[in-house]
Image (cartoon, helix red, strand yellow):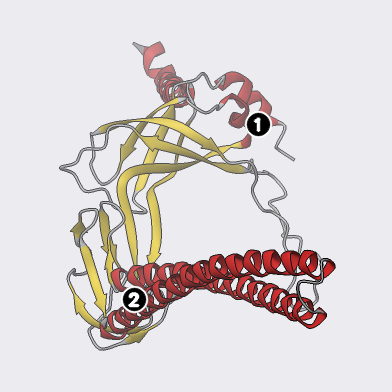
Amino acid sequence: MRIIRKYLPLFLLVFIFLCCAAYWLYWHLKPFTDDAFVFANTRPVSPWTAGYVTGIFVRNNQFVRCGSPLFTIFSPPYLLKARELQHEKEALEAKLKSCEAQWHRALEEIKTFRADVEKFRYFYSRAGAMFKSAAVSEDYVVEQDRNLKVALARMTAAEHNAEALKHDCSMLRAQIKKTAAALELQQIWCEQTTVTALSDGYVVNMTLSPGGYYKPGDVLFAFVDSSTWYVQANFKESELSEIKNGTRARIWLRQYPGREYQGEVCNVGWGAERRLTAQHTGVADVKKENEWFMLPQRYPVQIKILDPDKSLHLHFGGSAYVELDIPSHPFRQFFWELFLWK
């Protein structure tokens, strides 16, 4: 008993050391980090058309389905412009029909002038033969030659007119296509006066009210796409070489204690910025580091949550714990980090 009492503090110290070592080893058999948080794809919501807001159909932090209307922009100017383009297109189509009718008429006139040319060419050839036999005078031959030249000139003019009408028709067809494209674009603008959700998600940071005037690019609020959730886990650079895309992960969220999620690494951060520049001089700004212990650099690892519970609402930026299903070589890491001591 005396020996036990004498060495009891030492036994307790050894026992506590072994417990701490076992605890450290348990959490370092696989890469583990508590420097992680939940996030999802987000996008700023802004109108595609300029105007003032006439109606708002959602409230802040509301969950909405894909295709649900969020708000509307004053639409009558866009609808009137679409109607104007529709009337312009109809006018051009009517003008094209008139031009095509004139072109067909010109083609028929060419046939008449060609017949006249053939007729006067025949008369001219007969007049030449008759003049050789002294049956007609020279003036008659000259007159037939003049008639033939006039017929040829009329036929040539008719052909040029038909060609011009043909090009006019082509120009009108191009104008119709241009107007139709402008009308289609204007119809798109009309549709975009009602802004809808592009996916399932949450309306975040909305302080919007009817009557405000906004233009494309003005950010009105944020939208969190809840179709896919991720966790960004920042791991030490000494563990980075073992982490690959497709590595399985176990995830715990502080928001839901005791619940475990399954995940998969989908992206390993390639770099982390450490260069700093002094704003007032422009030269390199070197931060003073701890002279006794240099912490390893951490890199972001993006992990997709494979089994999010639809009944439990995840919150953007919530804290998380992540363990990767790969060996971490704890003893090698421990002795390697000893070299970080100065």
189 and 131: which one is in front? 131
Percent coordinates x, y for residue 125 in the rendering: 75, 64
Q: Is disc 1 surrounded by few (<14), some (14 to 19) or many (20+) residues within 10 Å?
A: some
Q: Give percent across and percent down for residue 250.
A: 36, 29
Q: Residues within 10 Å of mark 2 (few under 14, many from 20)?
A: some
Q: Which residue is mark 2?
A: 90
Q: Quadrant of residue 112?
A: bottom right
Q: Position of residue 91 (x, y in %)?
A: 36, 80
Q: Say which mark, if any, is on residue 207.
A: none
| Marks 1 and 2, how far apart at CA | 79 Å
Question: On the rendered image, what quadrant is the N terminus found in?
Answer: top left
Viewer-proximal residue, 100 or 312? 100
Please state which amino acid type lies under the numbered disc 1: Glu
Residue at the spot 37% in from the left edge and 18% down from the top edge: 5
- Asked if the residue at tag 2 contacts the one at tag 1, i.e. Cβ–Cβ closer than 8 Å, the answer is no
Mark 1 falls on what kind of element? helix
Q: Amino acid at mark 2?
A: Glu
Task: Provide the secondary structure element on which disc 2 rests.
Answer: helix
Determine which residue is flagged by label 1. Answer: 337
Which quadrant of the view contains residue 27?
top left
Front: mark 1 or 2? 2
Side of 262 where 239 appears, left or right: right
